[in-house]
Amino acid sequence: DDEYRVFYVRYHDQTHIKHSKVRILAKLANPDNAPDIVSELGELVANVDEMMGRIAVQSMASIAMHDSGGQGAVESIARRLVEMLDLHGIPHISSEAATALASLVRRHPSIVSVVSAPLPRALKYISEPAGKASVIFLLGECGESIMEAPYVLEKVIDSYDSIADAAVKTALLGATVKLFFYRPPEVKNMLGKVLKKATEDVSSQDLHDRALFYYRLLRSSPDTNIAKSIVTSKSMTMSTKHFAEEDDSELRAALMHEFNTLCTIYRCKAENFIDEENIVKFVKVPKEHPLPREAPVTPVTDPGVNAITNHMGGVAMADAPQQSVTAVPSTVSAEVDLLGFGDDLSAMSVP
């Protein structure tokens, strides 16, 4: 069945349609069509549209993350992403590939040997903070098999003061601590330096607290094996369909209450992009009307009209007696002169 090809991107498709098609392709992948879909996504990586390239990389990683490509698909996709790390002329693709590989290693630790080789080289060229943080994280995960990993991280630590992004600093701290238990003689001085800088860094509370935690753990632990088991534990390995930080079930439940609005397009609540005084309050209609069907309906009278009537010396509409209207029998037949000549009006009149 090749109906999935309907979602291949066409040249004349609008941009948002193309993006949606690429996302849908990842959800349609199965062991039979995964090779064709991955090949199609690989052609879109170098697209002129930057967002299209990012979504294509994310979709390829999604197929591997959810094991929907069958046997051998994870390693095949991982090799494709490793090749993208060397696309120096397309920096956003290198960054997106590094981020995807970091998630894949968390989900499938067995691909460490496939990912480790190009990491020291990739760190020199990737400039986006998200991609750089992902490569540093991978150096900590694969540092046991990468001989030059400590020396690559040492250069980053020496330039710590010039790093502006907190995510890069946090990844650097975690990778250095983890690498310390794999290569203690080479990383000892580096670890002391990064702990000192991180504990004195007030730009990120999370970074500061993590540094204090690692410092107190290493200082007060009676046995280094206990600290090693905590830091190098593989308990973070993904065992469900998505990571905890990617769980958006609460947001999706909230969006269902504001369905058929722009909230479903922007993927955020109305309070995030509309001023509070302009937000329309949605009230669910009860299953049964609160008033019984036999309840008398009181006529609503405009108070402004009554005020004008009183000012003019008249009687308010609410106080005026209700007069019964006597029906006057019609003297004209129900027939209508369709042509408008009026020739038969006298004949239709009732004496």
Image (cartoon, rainbow, N blue to C red):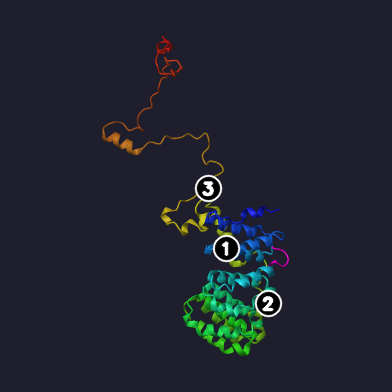
Indicate the amino acid at tag 3. Lys
Quarter holding residue 47: bottom right
Indicate the amino acid at tag 2. Ser
Going from the N terminus, do you reach mark 1 or mark 2 first? 1
Using the image, determine if residue 224 lies above or below residue 305: below
Q: Crowding near pointer 3: few (<14 within 10 Å), some, many (20+)?
A: few
Q: Crowding near pointer 2: few (<14 within 10 Å), some, many (20+)?
A: few
SS at badge 3: loop
Going from the N terminus, do you reach mark 2 or mark 3 first? 2
User: Nearer the viewer's eye, disc 3 or disc 1?
Assistant: 1
- Is residue 260 magenta-colored? no
Quadrant location of the C terminus?
top left
SS at badge 1: helix
Q: Which residues are magenta?
A: 69-73
x then y, percent, for residue 35: 68, 62
Q: CA distance from mark 1 to mark 2?
A: 26 Å
* Residue situated furthest right in the rendering: 71
Q: Is residue 79 left or right of residue 13?
A: right
Q: Is residue 245 left or right of residue 73?
A: left
**Residue occupying the point 46% across, 34% down:** 297
Indicate the amino acid at tag 1. Ile
Q: CA distance from mark 3 to mark 1?
A: 37 Å
x then y, percent, for residue 332: 42, 15
x then y, percent, for residue 23: 60, 59
Using the image, determine if residue 119 lies above or below residue 335: below
The residue singled out by tag 3 in the image is 284
The residue singled out by tag 1 in the image is 55
The residue singled out by tag 2 in the image is 113
Can you see residue 261?
yes
Query: Main structural element of the magenta stretch: helix, strand or loop?
Result: loop
**Residue occupying the point 33% across, 36% down:** 305
Going from the N terminus, do you reach mark 3 or mark 1 first? 1
